[in-house]
Image: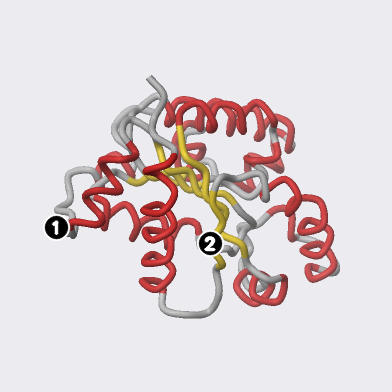
Amino acid sequence: MSGPSPQDQSKDQPKEQPTELEANVAAALGDRALVLVGMMGAGKTTVGRRLASRLGLPFFDADVEIEVAHAGMTIPEIFREHGEPYFRDGEARVIARLLDGGPCVIATGGGAWMREETRRRIGAKGVSMWLKADNDVLLRRVKRRTDRPLLQTADPAATIDQLVAERYPVYAEAELTVLSRDVPHDRIVDECIAALAAYLPAHPQSQ
């Protein structure tokens, strides 16, 4: 499929004027990407888009980029027609490409961080941030949606519990953790920026 994705087009939209703190955080990132990881429903896309705007950086949703790479097929369609292993391979390639593109904010799918190869790439070219949410918050946010293939089960609550048990120990390997909860999105963004401002000066980009 030719032409820019919606995320590519968003690069041309005016950004908010960063505050001094936000400008300092963006500068401290250097050429690295800020990569948001966590469960479906944790708010990675919503928070990530606002965070990118505040930092004056482009934003990419890895799931949307995967759909663009598959000529507009939706994530459920890719799962259904090709299977999860195929999807995960494509997801890893998309994230690797985004990481090579310079400073930006990337929202990843819930399973992306579970692949060791992807964690290594993010560690080399990005800063990882886990948006951590409680099980009940996740269920409340995603239970009415039909675009989450892993939750199309008889008992979504039990599925979330199982995924949380499997994934949270691995998500905990992210460099930063911010609690995602039902407060105004800009409050979560403020906390993400504060966490970065505290972390980045002691963890400069390696040359």
**Crowding near the residue tagged with mark 1, few <14, some 14–19, many ≥20 C-alpha atoms within 10 Å:** few
* Amino acid type, mark 1: Gln
Residue at 29% in and 35% down: 4
Q: Which residue is mark 1?
A: 17
**Crowding near the residue tagged with mark 2, few <14, some 14–19, many ≥20 C-alpha atoms within 10 Å:** some
Label drawn at residue 178:
2
Residue at 51% in and 26% down: 124
Which is more toward the observer, 89 or 176?
Answer: 176
Residue at 21% in and 50% down: 23
Which is more toward the observer, 118 or 178?
Answer: 178
Quadrant placement of the N terminus: top left
Ranked by sequence position, the earlier of labels 1 and 2 is: 1
Residue 32, compared with residue 199, is above or below; it is above
Residue 44, compared with residue 186, is above or below; it is above
Query: Residue 145: horizontal and vertical position, in percent?
Result: 61, 67
Distance (Cα) linking label 1 and label 2 = 24 Å
Choose mark 1 or mark 2, whichever is in front.
2
Query: Residue 115: horizontal and vertical position, in percent?
Result: 69, 33
Label drawn at residue 157:
none
Which is more toward the observer, 16 or 195?
Answer: 195
Residue at 39% in and 73% down: 187
**For residue 207, what is the image quadrant?**
top left
Which residue is situated farthest in the bottom direction here? 183
**For residue 201, what is the image quadrant?**
top left
Question: Does residue 18 appear left or right of residue 64 in this picture?
Answer: left
Are the residues tagged 1 and 2 within 8 Å (C-beta)? no
Residue 77, compared with residue 92, is above or below; it is below
Query: Residue 132: horizontal and vertical position, in percent?
Result: 61, 62
* Amino acid type, mark 2: Val
